[in-house]
Image: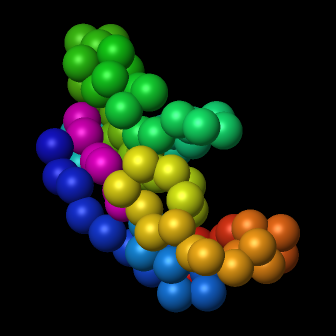
Amino acid sequence: MRVHTVEGGGGVKLRVRESGSESGRPILLMHGWSQNLRAWEMQYESPRLKGFRLVAFDLRGHGESEAPAKAEAYTDGELWAMT
C-alpha cells in the first residue's frame, strides 16, 4: 500500500491511496458525498482484487484532502479534474 498526495485542479492537495499489484489493471475508486477513501477498506483487503491496482482518493474537502475556503472551489467544474 502507498499513500501520497497529488495536486488537483486549482492546486488543491488530494490524498491518494494505492494498493494491490502495481502492474495490475487499475481500478479507480471514488467515494460519495460526506465519505473518504476509507470507504473502500473491504476492497483493499479483498483477495479477489489483489491482482488489480486499486487507486482511491479523497475528494476536495473530504478526508485528508485540502478543503478550500471559497465556494467557487467547489462549484467550478474545471477545478474538479486532477492535473
Q: Which of the colour schemes (rainbow, by chain, secondary structure, one colour) is used?
A: rainbow
| Nearer-the-camera pick, 64 or 7 | 64
- Identified at 83% across, 69% down, the residue is 75
The magenta segment is: 15-20
Tell me: 18 left or right of 32: left
Q: Is residue 6 above or below residue 10?
A: above
Q: Is residue 59 left or right of residue 45?
A: right
Q: Residue at x 46, y 40 (%)?
A: 36
Query: Could you tell me which residue is drawn at 42 percent across and 48 percent down?
Result: 63
Residue nearer the viewer, 40 or 75: 75
Q: Quick check: is 4 in the magenta stretch?
A: no
Q: Image height check: is 60 above or below 50?
A: below
Point 79% across, 78% down: residue:
72
Q: Is residue 26 visible?
A: no
**Which quarter of the figure has residue 13?**
bottom left
Count the labels in the image: 0
In this picture, residue 32 sits left or right of residue 40: right
In this rendering, the answer to whether 26 lies above or below 16 is above
